[in-house]
Image (cartoon, rainbow, N blue to C red):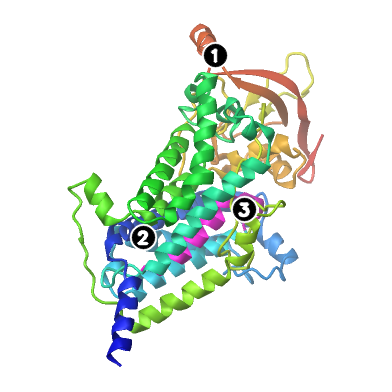
Amino acid sequence: MKSAYRGIVEWLSWFDARDYEFARQVLQRGTAALYLVAFLSTVNQFPALLGERGLLPVPAFLEMARRMGRPTLFRWRYSDSLLRAVCWTGIGVSVLLVIGLPQMGPPWLPMLAFLALWFLYMSIVNVGQTFYGFGWEILLLEAGFTVAFLGSDQTPPPTTILILIVWLVFRLEFGAGMIKIRGGHEWRDLTAMFYHHETQPMPGPLSRQAHLLPRPLHKVEVVGNHGAQLVVPFFLFAPQPLASIAAGIIIVTQLWLVGTGNFAWLNWAAIVLAFAAVSDSVVHAVFPFIPLNWHEGADTPVWWLAVVVLVTVLLLVSSYRPLLNLFSRQQLMNASFNRWRLVNAYGAFGTVTKQRIEIVVEGTMDEDPRAPDERWLEYGFKGKPGDVRRLPRQWAPYHLRLDWLMWFLPLRTVHEDWFYAFLDKLLKADQATLRLLRKDPFDGERPRWVRARSYLYRFASRDEFRRTGERWVRVLLYDAVPPVQLKPGRRLTG
């Protein structure tokens, strides 16, 4: 009997990851901060994009998708006021978690707080249509659900949940690496970075400088990427300090991506989650001012142990299809295998676009849009390239959804419902839509005509920039959407 009891105590001591308190603090507060950004991005953009009078109105979507089977608070009723209430609730809960107040209570308190964030944001993603079809949406959902079971300051961090978070980072990194190896030849011949910094969806202020680096360094970038995504993730499961070193390599590579582009909270989420493999001992060795065992925590209650074990089994069972997907020739990228958006497949940039095509939207007050002296004025977007002199801004982890979808237009087709709805809103000078833009050349007045033109963009060389002051060189290709106007009855016509 004593030996059995001693065995249980030893198992419980393995369950308690007492050397990972710093990791828990980073995971909980960092994930909550990302939810804060996500809800803030939503409350600022969702009504204009998807609201009652948005480009793709949710009420119309719900009429067609009553049986979609995905959980959402808006299943039977949507209103912009309800959406804002959901967002501000999420923002409030996120702030409390960032501060650390729920973590000071019993373990069920931060659990409920994170589960609330997960369900509230899932309710938004499941009606967000194409504007919420990005991989970092499901990544944030899975992270929020898993982090919910890290407990509170009253209990040690549970080892199984930390391992599940490491498993999430492994799928995120290794999945992206496998997508690249199976994708375009540019990843295999090491030329991908000849193009990536220039053609990525939303360049940042340092993207041009990164693009202008010597080509041998770009090949080093690709080799480093392959190592960080195809080799390093396996060492996340190794004993310390190897696991912490592997996490450090992932964090450094993700910081490089943060500095050279705008990928919403994708890179920041990878950085936060990688801390699941970093022990207090290693942190203290590198940063001695961070104390060891700064929150000892009491013993784990049996009821909390039961909850965590149940969740661990659930997520492990759900890992079967994502695991097979990693080694499948038909590997899926950014896919969910269940309606709750848990244990997903991830990956990005299986191929790299070789040329940057931008859709530039213009309007005019002239009666005849084809007159030789017509005057067209360009709408300015907050994040996507337009003005050739303007330095790209750093927006990540904030997500500019309209700007991102504008990048996809030339890769698919400009003849998408949301884009024609956008042009219609410009013709009506819709204020909610105009607030999504950086510049309205008509100062709130209605243009008579709008059009969309396709341009080839490339970064200016250093010599070109010194001569002209222009960071981009662009060449007109064709009219993607010829001039259109509103006819009586408020219909968009050409």
Label 2: element kind:
helix
Q: Which mark is residue 334?
A: 3
Q: Quadrant of the N terminus?
A: bottom left
The amino acid pointed to by label 1 is Ser
Label 3: element kind:
loop
Q: Residue at x 41, y 81 (%)?
A: 306
Residue range in magenta is: 128-150
Residue 98 placement: quadrant:
bottom left
The image position of residue 444, as x and y in percent, is 57, 35
Residue 143 is one of the magenta-drawn residues: yes
The image position of residue 407, as x and y in percent, is 64, 36
Magenta stretch, overall SS: helix
Label 1: element kind:
loop
Q: Quadrant of the C terminus?
A: top right
Looking at marks 3 and 2 on the same chain, the residue that comes earlier in the sequence is marked by: 2
Is 423 located above or below residue 156 in the figure?
above
**In the orientation shown, which residue stands out farthest toward the bottom?**
1
Q: Which mark is residue 461?
A: 1
Give the CA distance from mark 3 to mark 2.
23 Å
Give the CA distance from mark 1 to mark 3.
35 Å
Residue on which disc 2 sits: 28
**In the orientation shown, which residue stands out farthest toward the top?**
467
The amino acid pointed to by label 3 is Asn
Q: Nearer the viewer, residue 416 or 207?
A: 207
Give the CA distance from mark 1 to mark 2.
43 Å
Verify CB contact (< 8 Å) between mark 3 and mark 2. no
> Disc 1 vs disc 3: which is toward the camera?
3
Q: Quick one: label 3, few (<14), some, or many (20+) residues within 10 Å?
A: many
Residue 209 is one of the magenta-drawn residues: no
Q: Residue at x 72, y 36 (%)?
A: 411
Is 398 located above or below residue 156 in the figure?
above
The amino acid pointed to by label 2 is Gln
